Amino acid sequence: MELRQLEYFVAVAEERNFTRAAERVHISQSGVSAQIRQLERELGAELFDRSARTATLTVAGKAALEHARAALAAAGALGQAVDEVTDLIRGRLTVGMVIGCTVTPLFDALAAFHRAHPGVEISLLEDNSDRLVEEVRAGTVDLALTGTATAAPEGVNALTIISERLVAAVPAGHPLAGRRRVTLRDLGAQPLVCMPPGTGLRTVFDQACAAQGLRPVIALQASAADAIADLATRGLAVAILSESMAAHYRDRLTALLIDDVEAPALLTLIWRSTHNPAVRELLTHSRRAFGQGQAAP
């Protein structure tokens, strides 16, 4: 018994006609008839009543039909499973990361994925969060680590890794250094250094200022937290960072919680679809790797 015989049998049963079934499976009518005759001999029973112009199932044929369909479905599932493994052996994965963000767990996840599936070609690119969201939506990036202002950007799936408040970071001797908290109005007269537009942290900050009708002085912009901290340390501007970012520089900067910016900055993994088995696998490795928090850009 062969799968093609079962395929022809199902085709004739559904079309109720040998000619139409032959057209459906793209072989001659005589070929279909011969294969079904052979199947009937193997089963020891006729599957079709051929006495009329329409091919109708016999009792034995009706009993066999669902089993034939199940066998074909199982064979299809087997093929799909093998295809997925093949994709993982020879596939390609494009991963995005928000600019200026060195996130060790992401690199750990990529390394673990590479060890498990060394044949998959991995491409890693940096961009601002807004563009990464668009690239994931468009399918040009499979999975991205982004800084966002919303937990689930529209049109993509999302997994929040970090959710934390914004702070203002100032060096020793700064007029605000003796305080524990500030407001956006307190920062209004200060030159600020912040990440550029398109990053999640900047979006949260801009939205909070706009809600109060404030127009802060963004004197300097930098994509990397180290650069922002260095500029603030030199007294050029007050740094706007997330809590865990600022914690890395506590030896030279004092972090002040911004009381009236209640919306958190989020670090989020986003993806559009898990139809690609490589995406599913990398998500699994990423969930394991992000057991500990990192800075949210």
Image: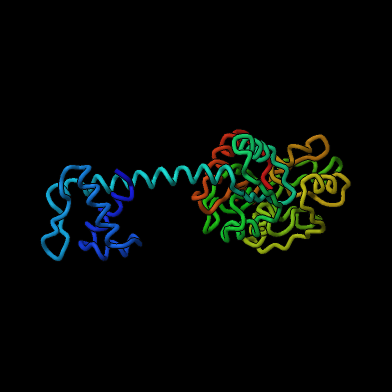
Residue under the image location 49 percent in, 50 percent down: 275
16 and 249: which one is in front?
A: 16
The answer to whether 196 appears left or right of 115 in the picture is right
Q: Quadrant of the N terminus?
A: top left
The colour scheme used here is rainbow
Residue 186 seen in render: yes
Image coordinates of residue 55 in percent, x first then y, are 17, 60
Counting the numbered discs, the total is 0
Q: Quadrant of residue 209?
A: bottom right
Q: Compared with residue 167, is residue 156 higher up or lower down, i.e. above or below?
A: below
Residue under the image location 37 percent in, 45 percent down: 75
Image coordinates of residue 67 in percent, x first then y, are 24, 44
The answer to whether 255 appears left or right of 81 in the picture is right
The answer to whether 41 appears left or right of 143 in the picture is left
Residue under the image location 51 percent in, 52 percent down: 273
Q: Quadrant of residue 23?
A: bottom left
Q: Residue furthest right?
A: 234
The answer to whether 273 appears left or right of 242 in the picture is left
Q: Compared with residue 14, is residue 77 higher up or lower down, i.e. above or below?
A: above
261 and 296: which one is in front?
A: 296
28 and 56: which one is in front?
A: 28
Residue under the image location 67 percent in, 39 percent down: 294
Image coordinates of residue 36 in percent, x first then y, are 24, 52
Image coordinates of residue 154 in percent, x first then y, are 53, 58
256 and 68: which one is in front?
A: 68
Residue 265 seen in render: no
